[in-house]
Image: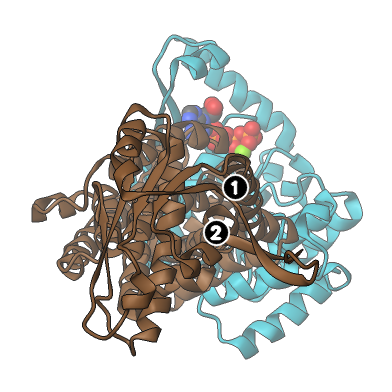
Amino acid sequence: MEAKIVVTDLTKTFRLSKKQQRIERTTESVKVAVDHLSFEAYQGEIFGLLGPNGAGKTTTLRCISTLIKADSGDIYVDGHGVRNEETEIRKRIGFLTSDLKLEEFFTPNYLFDYFARLHSVDPETAAARKADLFGKFGIDRFAEVKVGELSTGMRQKVQIALALIHDPGVIVFDEPTNGLDILTAKVVTDYLRELRDAGKAIIISTHIFSLVEKICDRVGIIVNGKLKWCKPLADVKASGTDLEQLFFDLVAEESREDSR
Amino acid sequence: MNAIWTIFKKEWDRVIKDKRLVLSVMLLPGLMIFLIYSIMGNVISDFTAQEPGQVAIVNPSAGFTALYSTPVWGEDENGDPVIVFEEKADVIAISVAEAQTYRDRIDAGDWDLLIVFPENLEADLAPGYQANIEVYHNQNETQSATVQSRFSGYLTVYAELLRQTVYGETDVLMLQTDSVEYDDEKAMGMMMSTLLPMLVVMFLFSGAMSIGPESIAGEKERGTMATLLIMPVKRSEIALGKVLSLSVLALISALSSFLGIISSLPKMMGMEVSQVLAIYDFADLALMLVLLFSTVFVIVGLVAVVSAFSKSLKEAGTLIMPLYLITIVIGITSMFSEGAVSGWWFYLLPMYNTVQSLTAILLSDSLAPWYVLITVAANLAVTAGLVYLLTRMFHSEKIMFAK
Ligand SMILES: Nc1ncnc2c1ncn2[C@@H]1O[C@H](COP(=O)(O)OP(=O)(O)OP(=O)(O)O)[C@@H](O)[C@H]1O
Ligand SMILES: [Mg+2]
């Protein structure tokens, strides 16, 4: 299997303002959000990044999708490096995260055409893909409703459709089922499986165990910016514990190491 | 290239498809100015109408008197209806000997205007004849100046009438005013050149201010900018697409304000729109348009850079305010200068160069095209610099994702 995403020794720190220091209750002016992280994601699999709040999942995914720059370490997406081939990566990646927002004034229909043009998708292909994606997620009926007037769930589905506008080979979804009811969540997870079977490399991040157990082939558990475990899901079961217990053990281990 | 157009189109649609924005960006500026100026104009004309002014004329001729009088039906001594002229001003006829007394009274401020016609002007009129007319008033007295400017208007018309009787001879009336040489177009040019540059930069700026922060700081604050930044397009294309569309929109907004002024001019100054426009020929208007376009780029570039730097829409508004005030102050400088400055290097300074070039165009300065040329070159260079800066800012994680 071909490694589509290769993350090596990724480190990302944030400088904290005085205000942020107060909020985070720390006197340190630098926050290490991701700490020497390395992993790979392969074509035709769903890789899950599992971690508690503030573990550094979103930060990792933002670095992969070139929204922010890593302090050190390397990331390659489909053979292209984040350091000097940002545009090539952006062409190949479908990124979903909660802090990428859509303009509320426009309709899903308008935005689809707009982003298709920015991705240089030719109009016919775009129209076919729009029909397909809007049909799959039930967006058709809301195609002419302003994004600002859509429900959270519908908005999330529109986001997903727009992230897939250019039929990317690599899919990076941060908490894809957040805020969705179980019916809608199922539509999304089913579709992710479909995309995997079509040969895409998929990374999702989540703190929901059941989601990982349901759709992921491999899982990386990330605590405090460090990757504590990275193996096929089958290995968890083989080791005699369940994912939840493993997770608690790793968190406990990390907090012992951290306080030392 | 394609991406620039795509982004341009989206920014355009954002405004054009939003009735509220169309109203506030494109229609209201012009409408508000029209209303304000018309009200101002009415107040001014009421003010002047109240006091007709005191005018003494030596050798008044019937043709001239008719100009400032309203024809009404009256009766002659037999009781038959005739047209008589009702005078609007308090005009008296005096003799040549009395003229000096009135000059003194005007100096002292208790009389407004003295006009001295030669004897038998209309009777002596023939080709080759030249008449000297003295117009005496006190510039330090508002009332005197107002009456003078009104009667100068009548004199211009009167000269025109006389000209026709002598088959188009042009020098038939020589006007002699006590200070300023009387010239209708020049006066109008002066009036426009003092006010207009300030108004123009104000309008351009407020047009840019009403949409720029929303499109950049607003998008940043709402997280829609991040969505744009992960698109496979150059950041410079994003910057250019935004600056270009915002410029066109700001220009439309400024034009709306401009139309507001033009259409309120008749009330404001008692002149027809066509009269005002007739002073400037096509070349002048073309120069103005080029000038305005280059200026709007600079303004939008500035507003965009400040907006990109701001964390929120509110912060952008706060940071842009001082720039707006500085621009107005620069605009006001045109009010106190006599004509445009002549050093070419002044035209390298953005905003100031616009104000000065505009003054030059309005005063029909022969160097105006050169000033505009330098101004446009300087403005384009500054815009390029600002777009470059904006691109750099779009690349900066610290600026774009500040928390
Ligand atoms: N721009 C930023 N400035 C300062 N600190 C940041 C910034 N972005 C993230 N952080 C910090 O980095 C750490 C990791 O954040 P991140 O969003 O990656 O966590 P996460 O695993 O996605 O958490 P969650 O499950 O809550 O989404 C957190 O402590 C967060 O406060
Ligand atoms: Mg997160």
Compared to B287, does A171 lie above or below? above
SS at badge 1 = helix
Q: Which chain is cyan?
A: A
Residue B65 lies, in percent from the top left, at: 51, 62
Snapshot colouring: by chain
* Residue that mark 2 sits on: B270
Q: Colour of chain B?
A: brown
Q: At 67% from the left edge and 65% from the top edge, which residue is drawn? A: B84
Residue B226 lies, in percent from the top left, at: 53, 51
- Give, as a three-letter code, the residue at label 2: Gly
Compared to A248, does A51 lie above or below? below
The tag on residue B45 is 1
The tag on residue A90 is none
Q: Is residue B188 visible?
A: yes
B111 or A183, which is in the foreground? B111
Residue B202 lies, in percent from the top left, at: 44, 47
Residue B294 found in image quarter: bottom left
Q: Is residue B341 left or right of residue B137?
A: left
Q: Is residue B227 left or right of residue B21?
A: left
